[in-house]
Image: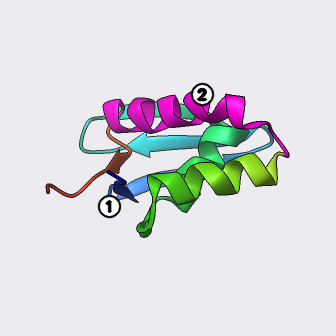
Amino acid sequence: MPKTYSRVPDLDVHEVPDGYVVYHSTKDSVSYLNKTAAIVFEFCDGKLSDDDIVQRVLKLFDTPDSSRGEIEACFEQLTKEGLIQSPAM
């Protein structure tokens, strides 16, 4: 079943040449996102499903469908780091 994700509020996001540096003040932690993770993070607007985001990233990078698992793992990592959340069903 598709999920939607949204960015956690009150993150301090800074663009750097190879992605983002994100400071999470509540957790007092810093995360470094590569370009792919930064794009996935940006697409997490609470409106797009995870399937939609994966399809957009695959198309954006002109990547084969076999890369789907890597992009899906990005959702797990961003959630684990407390940068995105999925509403409770």
- The boundaries of the magenta stretch are 62-81
Residue 86 magenta-highlighted = no
Q: Say which of 28 and 51 sits in front.
A: 51
Disc 1 element: loop
Residue behind mark 2: 70
Is residue 7 visible to us here? no
Residue at 56% from the left image edge and 55% from the top image edge: 53
Is residue 57 visible to us here? yes
Task: Using a 10 Å C-alpha cutoff, classify the residue at mark 2 as few (fewer than 14 neighbours), some (14 to 19) or many (20 or more).
Answer: few
Residue that sits furthest to the bottom in the current view: 47
Per the model, the C-alpha gap separating discs 2 and 1 is: 25 Å
Q: Say which of 40 and 71 sits in front.
A: 71
Residue at 32% from the left image edge and 39% from the top image edge: 82
Colour scheme in use: rainbow
Image x and y of residue 75, in percent:
45, 39
Where residue 9 sits, quadrant-wise, is bottom left
Does residue 37 appear left or right of residue 8 in this picture? right
Image x and y of residue 74, in percent:
51, 34
Residue at 68% from the left image edge and 30% from the top image edge: 67
* Residue type, mark 2 in image: Glu
Q: Say which of 24 and 55 sits in front.
A: 55
Image x and y of residue 18, in percent:
77, 37
Where residue 64 sits, quadrant-wise, is top right
